[in-house]
Amino acid sequence: MVMNFDIPKWTPTSKDVLEAHERIRDGIVRTPVLTSERIDRMCKAEIHFKCENLQRGGAFKYRGALNAVLSLDEERVKMGVATHSSGNHAIALSLAARKRGVPAYIVMPENSPGIKVDGVHGLGGMIEFCAPTQKAREEGALKLLERTGANFVHPYNDPRIISGQGTAALELLRDVGDLDMIVAPVGGGGLLSGTSISVRAFSPDTQIYGAEPSGADDARRSLRAGHIVPSEGPDTICEGLLTSLGDLTFSVIRENVRDILTCPDGVTVRAMKAIADLLKVIVEPSGAVSLGAIMNSPDIFKGKKVGVILSGGNVDISKACSLFQGDHDPSIGGGPGK
Amino acid sequence: MVMNFDIPKWTPTSKDVLEAHERIRDGIVRTPVLTSERIDRMCKAEIHFKCENLQRGGAFKYRGALNAVLSLDEERVKMGVATHSSGNHAIALSLAARKRGVPAYIVMPENSPGIKVDGVHGLGGMIEFCAPTQKAREEGALKLLERTGANFVHPYNDPRIISGQGTAALELLRDVGDLDMIVAPVGGGGLLSGTSISVRAFSPDTQIYGAEPSGADDARRSLRAGHIVPSEGPDTICEGLLTSLGDLTFSVIRENVRDILTCPDGVTVRAMKAIADLLKVIVEPSGAVSLGAIMNSPDIFKGKKVGVILSGGNVDISKACSLFQGDHDPSIGGGPGK
C-alpha cells in the first residue's frame, strides 16, 4: 500500500547486512545475549535472548534508521529525514538524525503511547499527529515531504532499513552457534525479513519463525494466502505490531520464513513478566511476543536451541506493572535471576 | 565478629583479582555496561552502569563464590561448602557448588526474602533457618560445619571472595576508560573492597566511593570512627546491606576508599524506578543504592565520568511494582530506553 514515496526498492542481500553492520557498528550498542535456566525449564528448550530492548532508543529500530541516515550523501541528508511511525521507528529516526545534525519530521498516529511521543520530542523530532490508520499515516507523510523536501525513510519497507535490522541476528549468530531456530516479532516485517536474510546466509540450517499477536495476525494470513492481507481492525496491546507487511518485506519473508506463530495478549503479558522476573530486563508487549509465541506453541520448540529477539523495551514501568497485576499466573514469580 | 571458622586471612592484591578472573571467566556472564542519556541529564554526570543484576544467580556474588569453590582442591571440595547469608551469596554459593557437583549448606535468617529462599532451594542448596542476627547466623553456621565437615565460605570477609568480587570493576575498567570515580554498594564490604583493589591497581586516578542506606550506615560510621562499628538495628528496605564489615574488608576499605555516601530508602526507590524506566533493567533495592547515593549527593558527581556497579536484581517484579507505586516522583517516568 505504499504510495508515491521516493524510496529504493531493491531486495537486500546478506552483503547489504554486512555493509550495514560496518556502517552502524560504532553507533549502536552491541546488545547482550542473556539466558535463564528457569525459562529454559519452563519452555523445555534452550533459549538465547538477544536484548534489543537495551539498544539505543530502546529498540532494534535504531539499527535500520541509523543505516538509512548514514547511507544518505551529504547533499541529500541536509534536507532532513521524515517518516510515519507509531513510535519506535520515530524515536530511532530522531536519534539517527540528531547524530548527523539534520532535522527529523515524524507523522505519528494520535493514539501513539505517551512514552514514545515523549521520546521523539526529547530527541528533537518534529511531530505531526494523524488519525490511527495506514492511509492517514501515508497521506500525512506525503504532505510533509512536499512541504519540507526531506528524505523519506519508511519504517520497514525499505532495503536500507531491512539490512540494518538484519544486523541484530548477525550479532546473535556470531555470539551463539548452532541455533535450531530463531524467532522474531513481525509487524511491518522489517525485523523479520532482515533476520531471515542473515540467517539464510550465515546459518542456513536454522529455521526462521515470525511471532505476532493473535489479534493482529495479518502476516500469518498473508503468508497462507500468498499475498499481502492488510491489517484491519487489529485488537492487541502490542501497539508496535499493528501495521501491514510491505511488498518488499512480504517477498523476503515468503521466501525465507518457515511459519508465523501467533500469541494471545494474555500469554504475551506472562512472557513479559517472566522476562522481568527471570532475565531482569523490561520489554514492551511487542518485544515479548516472540517468547509468548514459544510459550503458546511449546511442541515446536521442545528440546531445541532457540534464538529469540527481544525487540524493544519502550513501555512505561508503571504501565508494565499494571499489566503484571492483571496477570495471576502462579507458575511465574519469585526466583533468582538465572 | 567472625568466630572460629577455618578461613584464609591474607589480604588480597590485584594479582589475586587477575587470577580470580582467569579462574571464573568461562563460568560467569561478561555483564554489559549500559548508559542512559536521560539519567546523565538528570544527574548532570556521565554514568556507566555495570549490570551485575544480569550476572548468573542475579548478583555479583557469583564471582566470589565461584572463585572460592574453584580454589578448593579435589579432596577438600568433596565435603561441600557452607555459609550464612540472607540471600544473594547463598544463591551464588549454591550455584557454584552445583557446578562442581558438591553439596551447599546454607544458614539463612528466617526473614530472608522469599525470592532468595526459593532461589537457593531451586539450585539444590540445603537451608537451615536462624534468627535474623549476626550472632545467630554465625552460631548456626558453626554447628552446621561441625556436623557436615563442609568448607566454610564467608559471604565477604574472605580473600577468595574479595578477589572474585573485584573482577566486576576489572571488567568495567577494561570496557570504559578514564573514569573519575566508581561507586559500589557496601554491606559486609566484599564488593567494595574488591572493587577498590582493582581500581587502585588498574586506574589509580579514579576515586572510590561506597554507598549504603541511611538506615544502615555502619560502614560510614566505621570509616569515621577508625574501627568497625557493628550494624545494630538497621532500618532499610535494602535487605542485602544489613551486615557489618569484617576485619579484612574494613582494612582494605579504610586504605582505599575516599568516602561512604548514604541514601534514604525513598531515593533508592526513585533510583530503582529510573533504572527500570530508562535503562530497562530490574535491580533490587540493594543494587540501586549506588545510583541513589549519586542522586542524594549530586554535587560530588557533577560533570564527572562515573562508573556505577548495579550489584543485584533479585527482587520479585510484583514487589518492585508495589515499591514503584508508593513513589510519586514526577521527574521520573515515560521516556525512551536511552
Image (cartoon, coloured by chain):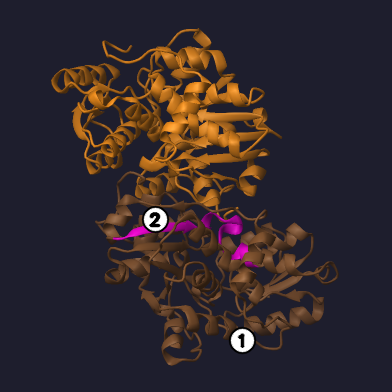
Chain colours: A brown, B orange
- What residue is rendered at 41% in x and 34% in y? B24
**Residue B208 magenta-highlighted:** no
Residue B187 in view of the camera: no
- What residue is rendered at 67% in x and 38% in y? B45
Is label 2 in a helix, a strand or a loop? helix
Per the rendering, the mark at residue A275 is 2
Q: Residue furthest right?
A: A75
A80 to the left or right of B65: right
- Which amino acid does the dot numbered 2 rest on? Ile
Q: Quadrant of residue B259?
A: top right
Give a yes or no on whether discs 2 and 1 share a subunit. Answer: yes
Residue A37 in view of the camera: yes
A50 to the left or right of A268: right
The chain letter under disc 2 is A
Q: Give the position of the N terminus of chain B as an image quadrant.
A: top left
Is label 1 in a helix, a strand or a loop? helix
The chain letter under disc 1 is A
- Which amino acid does the dot numbered 1 rest on? Lys
Q: Which residues are magenta?
A: A45-64
Q: Which residue does the numbered mark 1 point to in the structure image?
A: A135
Q: Position of residue A74 (x, y in %)?
A: 84, 66
Label 2 close to label 1 by CB (< 8 Å): no
| In the depicted structure, whether residue B225 falls above or below residue A248 | above
| In the depicted structure, whether residue B150 falls above or below residue A36 | above
